[in-house]
Amino acid sequence: MATIAVFGGTGKAGSECVYQALAQGNKVLVLARDPSRMVVPLGSGGEAGGSPLKDPKLTVIQGSVTNPTDVEKIFSSSKDISGVIIALGGKTKDVGPTMLSDGTRNIINAMKQISNLKRVAVITSIGAGDSEKQAPLFFKALMYTAMRGIFADKNRQEELFLSPEGPGHDLEYTIVRPGGLGEGPPTGVINVIDGQAGSIMRADVASFCLGAVLDKSFPYIKQTPCISSVGGTGWQKEKGMGFDGVTKA
């Protein structure tokens, strides 16, 4: 049994990570501005979706990822954290223009200063960083208009790991760039692609992230895999821990 810290655990993708980690028998720590929003995900949770998520292995601490002291509470609460999943999100008008990068920087600092942790999975998006050309045309239109602010912050967030001067560059990171996100049960089909992205259930994204922090031989450490289940190009099936089928581009 491992202990996993999830930031953004009350969001749609983050709650999938929390729910699936608990189902696997792991302990989970969550930092949440509003702990009452910690509910069973609609995808993996089935008929229980939307109900309060209660489990003796789950600890939810109230706080904000933009407050370094709050972030430190997570890492100070347990000495046996195995890995971290960063699933931060939200509209820029609600969370601010730098929440992703500010919060992620706080997490990196706490990982290194308190827990000496290495393994971390970060959910960003297709279209971030050098995956711009892999985004479908309709999504690019959103990236350049309505989602312009959030993508600027996603790029800053990724650079915390990808830049040689970034504070997270020496960590065992996996930057996960999913295609169009869906809400439903996991399909078990996860494709790492080098062409245009298709769609993928948040439940499958969560499965991939859990593999990234729990599988010692995970093949995408220090990489930026773009993943989808439906559509996309450049697929070559292979097996991996924590998911039924992974495709290596």
Image (cartoon, rainbow, N blue to C red):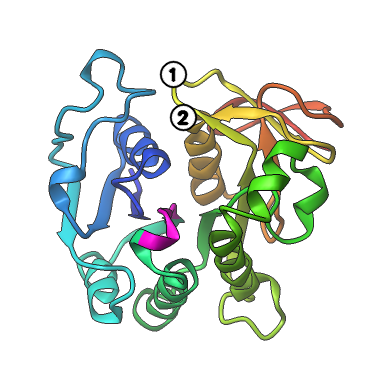
The residue under the point 58% across, 70% down is 171
Viewer-closest of 226 and 142: 142
N-terminal of the pair, mark 2 or mark 1, is: 1
Q: Residue furthest front?
A: 145
Counting from the top left corner in percent of width and height, residue 36 is at 13, 45
| Residue 158 figure quarter | bottom right
Residue 215 in magenta stretch: no
Q: Could you say whether the residue bearing mark 2 is in a helix, strand or loop?
A: helix
Q: Residue furthest top?
A: 47
Q: Quadrant of the C terminus?
A: top right
Q: Quadrant of the N terminus?
A: top left
The residue under the point 80% across, 36% down is 196
What range is drawn magenta here? 86-93
- In the depicted structure, whether residue 213 falls above or below residue 51: below
Q: Could you say whether the residue bearing mark 1 is in a helix, strand or loop?
A: loop
Residue 91 in magenta stretch: yes
Is 248 on the left or on the right of 184, as rendered? Answer: right
Is 147 on the left or on the right of 222, as rendered? Answer: left
Question: Badge 2 local density, few (<14 within 10 Å), some, or many (20+)?
Answer: many
Looking at the image, can residue 218 be seen? no
| Residue 82 figure quarter | bottom left
- In the depicted structure, whether residue 5 falls above or below residue 194: below
Circles 2 and 1 in contact, beta carbons < 8 Å: yes
Secondary structure, magenta segment, majority class = loop
Q: Which mark is residue 185?
A: 1
The residue identified by callout 2 is: 203
- Whole-Å distance between the Cαs marked 2 and 1? 6 Å
